[in-house]
Image (tube, rainbow, N blue to C red):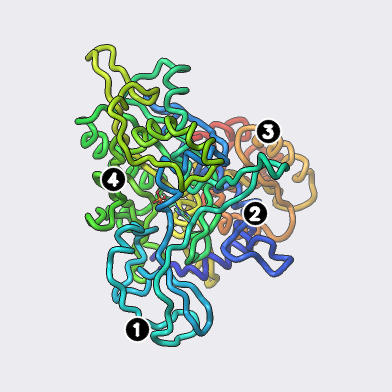
Amino acid sequence: MAKITKLDDIVSLCKRRGFIFQSSEIYGGLASCYDYGPLGVELKNNVKKAWWKAVVQMRDDIVGLDCSILMHPLVWKASGHAEKFADLIAECKKCNTRTRVDHLAEHAEEHTEHISLDKAIAATHDLSNKVCPACGKVGQFTEPMPFKLMFETQMGANVDDSMTLYLRPETAQGIFANFRNVLDTTRIKIPFGIAQIGKSFRNEVTTKAFIFRTREFEQAEIEFFCEPGTDEHWYEHWKKARFDWYTDLGLKKQNLRFRDHDPDEMAHYAKACVDVEYKFPFGSGDWQELEGIANRTDYDLRRHQRGIRTLNSWYESRGDLAKIDLKEEAEDYLKGPLSYFDDQAKKRYIPYVIEPSAGVDRSALAFLVDAYDEEEVRGEKRNLLRFHPALAPVKVAVFPLVKRDGMPEIARNIYNNLKGRFNCFYDHAGAVGRRYRRQDEAGTPFCVTVDGQTKQDATVTVRERDSMEQVRVSTDKLLNHLRERLEV
Ligand code: GAP
């Protein structure tokens, strides 16, 4: 029977086997920042490849994009991040630790990434009996105050023309900013989507649980543009498509669910929002957001349509975003470059947007947790990662049974022939049983062993990770045998 995974087991396996390390560990570590080691980078790349294959390669209605992290400051004014992307926090007067006010609530819901700042400010907060999670003192909090989540940086060497920029807190805005470019350079028509994978940065007040919530992370986002009125159809379409993506890659159905956002939790621009949640082995209720799917309406494109009209006032205000007024709705907003002309229906509109927004690191963590297993085999503990073949960092390991009798030469030859097709690993050190165990723990689906019989009949042993079953396969059929089973 599969073991109930504890996060500690995963963290320790990740460190021991080179999946994930603490950033700057040799200097004592940098909180909430992580580095992906040799196996981890393969896993993460495979998660990204599987996402890209499903949403770009296999679909005719989505194209890809890779935007810069640094963008014009007006982007963040128009998107609302410059003013509204903040958490309401309170500081403990005894230990100076800052805590999110929503996390101090009676039944703190740690499901939500960030709750709306406007709504948080409007609510009444009695912190007089609240306990500081850092020092345990009661009722010592300051008045709640907003804490901005975007990282600031300066661009340019000269004092006169340097400007304050932000590290993007989501990849989505780069997609909206390129909507017209993509329309003008491809022949794609609505309904269509733009997909992007990339780093995002948030100066999170509370980081959490290993790579679950960090300040630097990677997102995989789609903005799917559709005609107003068809948005509910596409919302349902994407809910199903995204749920199926996780289960097709091996996540157990019983560990995944949808959670609709409560109306007071929803972002101001959203008409509907649902989270795909995974039952992570930590947190108040275990179920935690893996991906958000939102109906963003025409909010972003309309805001950018207004944003680009404020360029002059931005120069006049010498880049002071607070002085830019975006509130007035221009009556002729349909005339801007971000509207869409449907040449069949002969009408112009601002498209609605359905946004499936996934976290790459969170997905990698969910795949790790779900694949982790322990079992007893002939009185010995076996740790293994039952990864889907598409996600396994190493697909095939090749061993000579012993380091003599010509076996290493044959094994090397097989390894050299296979490594152009799959990510392979060659290992000749130690007892073969130990080598199998090491590959089980890395999640390698197949091990190929060259032994005494290989010289006689040109066959090798192929051992499958989950069942540990071994079959003999002739070397000339080996590539096809593996290809069929790995589905790659
Ligand atoms: N563009 C919409 C957007 O960014 P979000 O719910 O804030 O929505 C989407 O983020 C996904 O990005 C989340 O479901 C999560 O997987 C990932 N994510 C967000 N903040 C994160 C953080 N601090 N660390 C790791 N992943 C994060």
| Picture coordinates of residue 323, whole percent (x, y) | 46, 45
Q: Amino acid at mark 2?
A: Gly
Judge: label 4 CB < 8 Å from ligand 1: no
The residue at 62%/39% (across/down) is: 459
Q: Which disc number belongs to residue 128?
A: 1
Earlier in the chain: of badge 2 and badge 3, it is: 2
Local SS, label 4:
loop
- Residue beneath the point at 36% across and 58% down: 117
Assess whether mark 3 and mark 4 are in contact (beta carbons under 8 angstroms). no
Q: Which residue is mark 4?
A: 270
In the image shown, does 430 or 123 lie closer to the viewer? Answer: 123
Looking at the image, tell me whether mark 1 or mark 3 is earlier in sequence order: 1
Q: Amino acid at mark 3?
A: Asn
Disc 3 target residue = 417
* Element under disc 2: loop
Residue at screen point 47% across, 39% down: 75
Q: Secondary structure at mark 3?
A: helix
Are discs 1 and 3 less than 8 Å apart at CB?
no
Q: Is residue 136 above or below residue 204?
A: below
Front position among marks 2 and 4: 4
First along the sequence among labels 1 and 2? 2
Confirm whether residue 470 shows in the render.
no
Q: Residues within 10 Å of mark 2 (few under 14, many from 20)?
A: some
From mark 4 to mark 3, how far is it between C-alphas?
A: 52 Å
Q: In the picture shown, does residue 406 fall above or below 348?
A: below
Q: CA distance from mark 1 to mark 3?
A: 69 Å
- Residue projecting furthest to the front: 316
Please state the horizontal and vertical placement of residue 140, each as a whole percent of the image. Answer: 43, 84
Residue at mark 2 to residue at mark 3: CA–CA distance? 26 Å
